[in-house]
Amino acid sequence: MKSKTLSKLKLLDKLKKIIGFERQKGKKVVFTNGCFDLLHIGHIRYLKAAKKLADILIVAINSDSSIKKIKGELRPVYPEKERAEILSAFSFVDYIVIFAESDPIKVVSELKPDVLIKGGDWSIDKVLGKDIVESYGGKVMTIPMIKGYSTTNLIKKIVKLEGYGTRNNQ
C-alpha cells in the first residue's frame, strides 16, 4: 500500500504542472533544497519558517548518488525514499522532489519559485539558482540557522557514543 505521505513526492514534470495550476489560483511558491539526512530541530525550525513565507513549500532533496559525491561514501545515512517519507510526514511541507544533479539549478529553472530560501550559513550571493530566480522577479532569502545543529555534528556525537550502553559500559 502506498504511503499517504509519500504522495507529496513528485517527479519534476508532474510537480511543474501542479505548481502551474496553483499559481493560477494566486498561490505563492517557496522552494528550498538540501540533503535533509538525519533530521534535527534545526531542520524542523528552518522548514517551519520557510512555510510561513509560502502558500506552497517545495523541498528538493539530493538523491543518494549526489549526496555521496558531496559528503562522501558513508552518506546519506537514510536513503532518498526514506528521507522523502520523513519530510512528507510534516504538514508544513507540501511537495518533495528528488534531484540527482549536484546542485538544484535544473529544478529551480523548471519550477520558477517565487522565493528561493537557504539557511543562514549561505551568503545570498552564493545561493545556487539566485540569478535564475531574480531574472523573473523572484526573491532569494536566507533563514537564520540554529547554532550547533547540523547533521555532521550529530553524526560526530553519535560516533563518540559508540559502545555506550553496551554491557561493558553500563
Image (cartoon, rainbow, N blue to C red):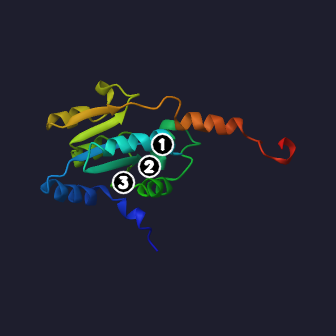
Residue at 85% across, 48% down? 167
Residue at 41% of width from left, 57% of height from top? Answer: 88
- In the rendered image, the quadrant that contains the C terminus is top right
Q: Nearer the viewer, residue 24 or 42?
A: 42
Q: CA distance from mark 3 to mark 1?
A: 16 Å
Reading the chain from its start, which is encountered first: label 3 or label 2? 2
Q: Position of residue 64 (x, y in %)?
A: 48, 49
Say whether disc 3 or disc 1 marks the residue closer to the N-terminus: 1
Residue at 48% of width from left, 42% of height from top? 67
Circle 3 residue: 96
Of the residues shown, which amino acid type is indicated by label 1?
Ile
Position of residue 155 relative to residue 2, above or below, is above
Residue drawn at the location 47% of the way across and 38% of the way down: 42
- x%, y% of residue 37? 51, 45
- Identify the residue position indicated by label 1 in the image: 67
3D distance between C-alphas at marks 1 and 2:
6 Å
Which mark, by number, is residue 63? Answer: 2
Label 1 SS: helix
Residue 47 lies, in percent from the top left, at 38, 44
